[in-house]
Image: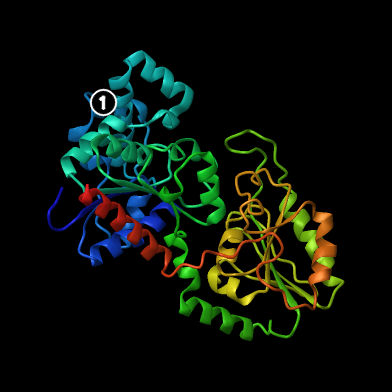
Amino acid sequence: MHAGKPHAFLAAYGGGHISMILPICQALRERGWKVTLLALTTASAIAEQAGEPYIGYKDLMHLAAPNAQAFGNQLCPDLDDNGPVSREETLAYHGANFAELVEVSDLESAWRQWEESARQAFLPINFMRRVLTEYKPDVVIATNSPRTERATITAAKQLGIPSLCMVDMFALQEIKWIGEPAYADRVTVLNEAVRQMFIAYGRDPDDVVVTGNPAFDVINIPSTIAAGRALRKARKWDDGRLTILWASTVEPQRHPFTGEPGDPELPRRVERKLREIVTQDQNLRLVLRYHPSENVTFVPEQNIEFSPTTEPLHSLLHAVDLVVVTASTVGLEAWLAKRPVLSIDGSIFTADAPFAKMGIAQRVTSIEKLADLLQDLAGKQIAFPLSGQLSPPSLLATAKDAVVMEIEKVLRLQRSV
């Protein structure tokens, strides 16, 4: 335990997870903390771009179990030198994790687990215990990911180091371990619905705190809101019509994890129905926003406009009146921007993004029911939230500051013992 400058050890992989950790690194450093960031996989490039110092598996190989480097070479013999993660880091990650499988079982069992589950078999608790022993942090912070991040918090608990787990969205799968009373001293979550889910699972109510997600703080900063107002004025969307944003997303042939068959035509069927509704009602306007992975050409039509992916999304959300989604994360971002959200059932990702269940959207059970709902809302001043929605948490601080406050509480509790 450091008597003076406290030391935080943070771990996160790429995508949205590093985006919610980076603001915490910066805020802690501004408050006088020492910060060590373990940036996993593609998180390293994002941390580097943000100017945030970090370490990776390649810097920790002296703490790996025997033969880790050799195992890495065996598991990844044909690496692309131009991949999103460096060759050295990829070999180190696979090697250290596989070496731990051998360490906790035996070589034959390790290969069997790799063949059955690949990286899903990795949970390097022993490795992370050695890492934390070397770095000696006062507090450990990690996201809700299932491998290194989970191992980091588990190792911290074994070493008596206080820890905090940041949940990005709903944790429907991760609750299986984050919901355990002994996992992490504090869990920070998106909204009250997620908090209640954890409490129902068995977590102490004092351990689960609604903070929001720091990655989304930018949605409601004054410059974003002002840009939204300017966009609305420039596009002449303040003429009394209800401006509806359809945030489309890709629907694959099969669910990537469950194998459930999907309907790739679902996004286009929703769009056709929305076009039909809007062209028949002069009180409605539709704005189409395609997912970057969709190969769709916009076709102009009466009362229908286009928002390219180059247009800032968060400003756009503050410019429209209502947002329609199936399973796009834009639904969550729209709710945070205090825009009413309609969530249409039927996607294979509905169970993974249960916006209506989590109080973020009003449920629409079928495409056909959209017409009556939208026509009923046409020409009205829509009150937020819509029926069944929760308001975003009324925090006294940004999500970043709220999380940092919880980290400092955890440290004070530890130091008072």
Q: Is residue 220 above or below residue 79?
A: below
Image-quadrant location for residue 182: top left
So how many labels did they put on this image?
1
Q: Label 1 amino acid?
A: Ala
Q: At x 64% / y 45%, what residue is drawn?
A: 349
Left or right position of 112 against 372: left
Q: Mark 1 falls on what kind of element? A: helix
Q: Is residue 7 visible?
A: yes
**Lateral position of residue 263 relative to residue 65, left or right:** right
| Colour pattern | rainbow
115 is higher (above) or lower (below) than 151: above
For mark 1, does the 10 Å Cα neighbourhood hold few (<14), some (14 to 19), or many (20 or more) residues?
Answer: some
Farthest front residue in view: 417
Where, by quadrant of the figure, is residue 125 drawn?
A: top left
User: Residue 321's spot in the image, x, y percent?
Assistant: 68, 74
Residue 390 occupies quadrant: bottom right
The residue located at (30%, 56%) in the rendering is: 409
Residue 212, x across and y down, in percent: 47, 60
Q: Label 1, on which residue?
A: 70
Residue in view at x 23 percent, y 24 percent: 67
